[in-house]
Amino acid sequence: MDVGLIAIDGVADFGLCALLEVLSTAVSLRSETDDGAEPWTVTQLGLGSEVLTGFGHRAPTTPIASLSRLPDVLVVPAVSTRQATELIEILSSSQNRPILELLSQARSQQAEVAAACTGTFFLAEAGVLDGEMATTSWWLAPIFRRRYPKVDLQEGLILSQSQGVTTAGAAFSHIDLGLAIIRSHSPELAELVDRYLLIGSKASQAAFAIPAVMAGYDPLTSAFERWVREHLAQPIQVASVAKHLGVSERTLQRTTAEVLGMSPVELINAIRLDKATQLLRTTNLTATEIATRVGYLNVSTLRGLFHRRGTTMSELRRSAPKRI
């Protein structure tokens, strides 16, 4: 099976190297499996014979124009930018049009495509995610949702897989992406790579998302987020907050849905969970005291919300860095 990693100038060093490490480990371990895993090749592809990574390192690439056949799997690592405007400029550049055309051609010929973090924007820009469920880096979700309304974005997921299409979340999920590609062809080989590299598993990106960052892409959601955070311990009525912000409740509901994919109540809960997580990891407050500080009368409500995220208050407290 041929896997092509598509790199452009500014490719994220970690993303590219993580995928190379995971996939190359699969190549070297294939002979140790009993399930007849097929031979693998991994090739770095680009517009020319080399690219400059985000940190300025030169990486050799095989020009896509020289390909005699499409790889079985095309993977797009992240590009190294934290600015949404810069990312859109990269996607819209005529220089990168051949990348989008290659991805579109690959899907039309039933080849697999995959991407992580900012790389998922290339799949969406090429149209191959239309009508599909996908994920991306949580902090880019508002921009993604607005630019690609035909994609069913579920940014809480670390991995999203459908027939022939795999997307992954933020930077470290490149590792999960590489493992998922291997698993779809050889579960035994994926298990072996997982054990060799101590990858483990993570349930969701939701626990890592910072509400203030996501809300900051829109003035109204940003103002709503700030108001909620300033009144966190108090009972919060969405209609009252909307009136305070000078908009109707319906406008507020529509805006949070369009920008964040959640209702105002869900955003309030996300903000409260964010603060509760910080308190669990940095203080010795009891669970009941934390629940009160973030606006819940019953600690069971807070426990239930954390459980829905795939974690517990005890796990979060245990995972906190030890203070000396």
Image (tube, rainbow, N blue to C red):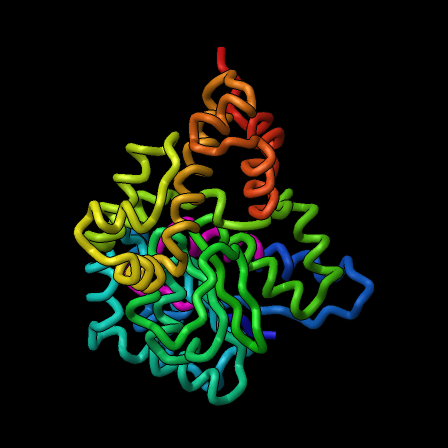
What is the x, y in percent for residue 233? 39, 30
Viewer can see residue 44:
no
Q: In which quarter of the image is residue 9?
A: bottom left
Foreground of the two, 191 or 52: 191
Q: Name the residue at the left extreme.
A: 246
Q: Quadrant of residue 128?
A: bottom left
Q: Name the residue at the top extreme.
A: 324
Foreground of the two, 78 or 248: 248
Give the left or right position of residue 133, taking residue 83 as reference.
right
**Going 49% across and 85% down the picture, which residue do you hit?**
69
> Does residue 145 sit above or below 315 in this rendering?
below
Q: Name the residue at the right extreme.
A: 34
**Going 35% across and 51% down the picture, which residue do you hit?**
139
Task: Tell me where the magenta segment starts and ends, as one range.
Answer: 6-22
Viewer can see residue 278:
yes
Give the left or right position of residue 242, taking residue 206 as reference.
left
Q: Does the magenta stretch include residue 255?
A: no
> Does residue 275 sit above or below 305 in this rendering?
above
> Does residue 80 sit above or below 126 in this rendering?
above
What is the x, y in percent for residue 246? 17, 52
What is the x, y in percent for residue 104? 40, 83
What is the x, y in percent for residue 271? 39, 40
Foreground of the two, 235 or 40: 235
Q: In which quarter of the image is residue 163?
A: bottom right
